[in-house]
Image (spheres, rainbow, N blue to C red):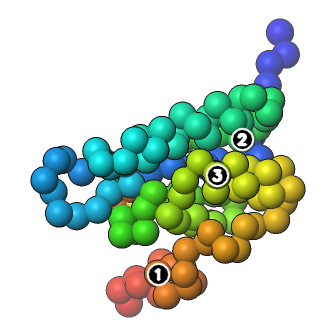
Amino acid sequence: MEYSIPQPAFYIFKCQQSAPPGMPKPSCVSQASVESQQLFMHMAQSLMQKGIVSTVQPIQTGCMNRCQLGPIMLVEPGHTMYVNLNKEKIDRIIEEHIIGGNVVEEYVIPNEMWGDAIDPKTLLQQ
Ligand code: FES
């Protein structure tokens, strides 16, 4: 039997790191914020309701070291890091970026916290 699984158009990596109670460091999922605990499910349900989850894959991931700007998520391809998320922002990112093809610039991480990637080759010992 012929069987194939096409590659996804997008992966959305949502940081699901939760700091233990009393930990001073911020985290993307907070005991103090019910909404922060619901964001991954909200995104996944929204993709399902729109019927696009077969080509847009939501992934739960750990800390991506931008905790002070959380909740965050990374959209690939494109290396687009979105920060300070809530449900409304996620809805807009799905509509405008994932479906519409236009990055929602106002939710993108500031350049000084992201900038251009460092090519690993430049770090190699000679
Ligand atoms: S806890 Fe989410 S980026 Fe660190």
- The label on residue 56 is 2
| Distance Cα–Cα, label 1 vs label 3 | 23 Å
Q: Which of these two is toward me, 32 or 10?
A: 32
Q: Amino acid at mark 2?
A: Val
Give left or right: position of 43 versus 32.
Answer: right
C-alpha separation, residue under disc 2 versus residue under disc 3? 19 Å
Residue 19 at x, y = what percent?
A: 24, 51
The reply to whether dot 2 and dot 3 touch (C-beta < 8 Å) is: no
Left or right: 33, with 22 as reference point: right
**Residue 117's x, y, as percent?**
54, 79
Q: Quadrant of ligand 1?
A: bottom left
Mark 1 element type: helix
Q: Is the residue 69 above or below the residue 113 in the image?
A: above
Q: Mark 2 and mark 1 in contact (Cβ < 8 Å)? A: no
Precedes in sequence: disc 1 or disc 3: 3
CB of residue at label 3: within 8 Å of ligand 1?
no
Q: Which residue is mark 1?
A: 113
Mark 3 residue element: helix
Q: Residue at x 35, y 86 (%)?
A: 125
Q: CA separation, marks 1 and 2?
A: 26 Å
Is 118 in front, or is 24?
24
Can you tell which of label 1 and label 3 is closer to the viewer?
A: 3
The answer to whether residue 97 is above or below residue 114 is above
Residue at left offset 22%, top offset 64%: 25
What quarter of the picture does the C terminus occupy? bottom left
Residue 39, image x and y in percent? 52, 43
Label 3 CA crowd tier, 10 Å (few <14, some 14–19, many 20+)? few
Residue at image position (54%, 58%) is 85
Mark linked to residue 88: 3
In the image, 22: left or right of 33? Answer: left
